[in-house]
Image: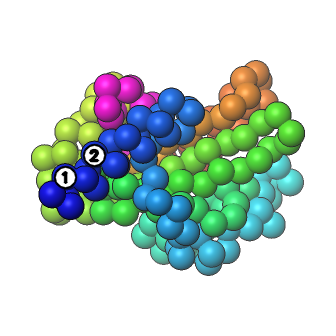
Amino acid sequence: MKKTFILVAAAVLAISCTACGAGSVTASGVESTASSAAVSSSASSSSGTVADAAKYSDSLKGLITYMGACGYIDGNGLQMEYQLIGAKNGYRYTKKIDKKQTVTAEFYEYDLKNLNETAKKMLDSVEQNGYFTLFNKKITAYRSDNGKYLMVYKDSASGDASTARQKEAVVKFKTFKK
């Protein structure tokens, strides 16, 4: 009974989050400990300085720290209900660009040697279609070149600057630990 209630609550939360444009499900406000390890924008791409991916461990924590050093995310992340997409772990970050613009980035890690059916289905869909489906919503996602990580990236603004920032973020993400 308790397990059913939790699943129903997760589904309701997922639907309410996707209706707001978030695109996925968060675990009730759990802050990421992985993010506190240096998600600063001191080496941001906007300043022309780019972080060297080789300096970061090949882990979700390393990826998150790297993306923070590149200036794409900052602050503490919220742990996601990563099990819903078969992931090993996952976090969401929100970065306010200015008064009108917010970027949301979600990062998920998969254990490629131990993928369950849900993980296989999600990763195959992203590989083939560029999105996965969760609660009847198509969610655009990117898979890293090494296949181990998944990113969902949303920008509240449109235009050339937003498109360029997203393209840069996707390239940095995809080539992390290639």
Q: Quadrant of the C terminus?
A: bottom left
The residue at the point 41 percent across, 35 percent down is 15
Q: Which residue is mark 1?
A: 4
Residue nearest the viewer, comparing 63 with 82: 82
Q: How is the image coloured?
A: rainbow
Left or right of residue 137: residue 22: right
Task: Name the kind of residue labelled 2 in the image.
Answer: Val
The kind of secondary structure element at disc 2 is helix
Q: Position of residue 157 (x, y in %)?
A: 73, 28
Left or right of residue 22: residue 161: right
Q: Which residue is mark 2?
A: 8
Dividing the picture into quadrants, the one containing residue 65 is bottom right
The residue at the point 53 percent across, 62 percent down is 29
Query: Badge 2: how crowded within 10 Å, few (<14), some, or many (20+)?
Result: few
> Magenta region's main secondary structure?
strand
Asked if residue 12 shows in the view, the reply is: yes
Vertical arrangement, residue 94 with respect to residue 35, above or below: above
The residue at the point 47 percent across, 60 percent down is 28
* Magenta highlight range: 132-144
